[in-house]
């Protein structure tokens, strides 16, 4: 089996570029921005931001002290890893969530353990609760890689930027801080649940279509042991 490898143009350095991003905090940011999220995040420990304003709002709508931040990230002279949605993206997330521990020491484990080595920031599609459902089904051996990739291709939720180093975090500036009212949080909960149900139903249809095509997660791992 051929393992998906990162292309040479995935790792790049951008000079003189800024982008507006959003971050949701359950209780508000305290102190300088730092790469201190929990370890088991999609791209490892870092500071996570997204391109879509609505996505972080759905993450904090259950928290009365939740705040939405509008940020400006300066990408000048940062080493970036840009991972397109697909199997490579899914397996990088699998590694960071501890799903590859059964093949620790293997070639595929080493590939994803070192994929973001030396990067200041990783860019990739957001894996919210709709994608979590599909990814978990893949990791649990319920659907194939082909079903996974085709499902992910229709669940476009925007990009997330994970600042992994102090250098990257030092180049992020807060433009605006917004508290979410109780009324808005109720509306967001309703909208979030409706979108979640719609996304899961859409993915279920695609998974059924490809249920006999492709490879299962354990088959991919066994092929490279």
Image (cartoon, grey):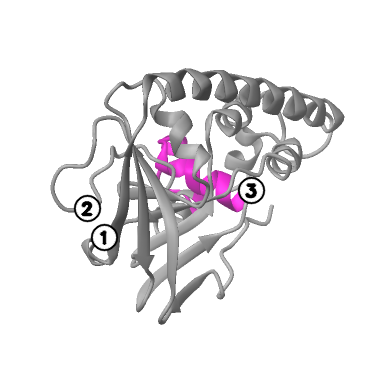
Q: Quadrant of residue 26?
A: top left
Q: CA distance from mark 2 to mark 1?
A: 6 Å
**Helix, strand or loop under label 3:** helix
Q: Give the labeled residue for mark 1.
A: 169
Q: Give the labeled residue for mark 2.
A: 33
Question: Does residue 11 appear to the left or right of 162 in the view shown?
Answer: right
The mark that comes first in sequence, 2 or 1, is 2
What label sits on residue 124 in the rendered view? none
What label sits on residue 87 in the rendered view? 3
The mark that comes first in sequence, 2 or 3, is 2
Q: Quadrant of residue 37?
A: top left
Contact? badges 2 and 3 (CB < 8 Å): no
Residue toward you, 113 or 198: 198
Q: Residue at x 72, y 34 (%)?
A: 144
Give the residues drawn in magenta, as a range: 87-108
Relative to residue 78, is residue 175 depicted above or below? above
């Amino acid at each position: 089996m051929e393992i998906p490898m990162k292309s040479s143009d995935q790792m790049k350095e951008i000079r003189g570029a800024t982008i507006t991003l959003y971050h949701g905090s359950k209780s508000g940011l305290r102190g300088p921005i730092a790469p201190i999220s929990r370890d088991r995040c999609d791209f490892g420990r870092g500071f996570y931001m997204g391109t879509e304003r609505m996505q972080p709002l759905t993450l904090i709508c259950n928290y009365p002290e939740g705040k939405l931040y509008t940020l400006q990230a300066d990408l000048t002279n940062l080493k970036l890893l840009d991972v397109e949605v697909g199997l490579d993206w899914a397996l990088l997330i699998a590694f960071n969530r501890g799903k590859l521990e059964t093949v620790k020491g293997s070639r595929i484990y080493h590939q994803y353990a070192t994929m973001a080595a030396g990067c200041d920031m990783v860019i990739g599609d957001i894996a919210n609760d709709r994608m979590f459902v599909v990814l978990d089904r893949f990791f649990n051996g319920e659907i194939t890689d082909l079903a996974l990739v085709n499902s992910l291709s229709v669940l476009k939720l925007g990009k997330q930027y994970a600042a992994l180093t102090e250098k990257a975090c030092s180049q992020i500036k807060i433009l605006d801080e917004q508290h979410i009212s109780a009324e808005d949080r109720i509306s967001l909960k309703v909208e979030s649940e409706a979108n979640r149900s719609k996304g899961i139903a859409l993915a279920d249809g695609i998974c059924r279509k490809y249920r006999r095509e492709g490879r299962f997660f354990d088959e991919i791992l066994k092929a490279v042991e």
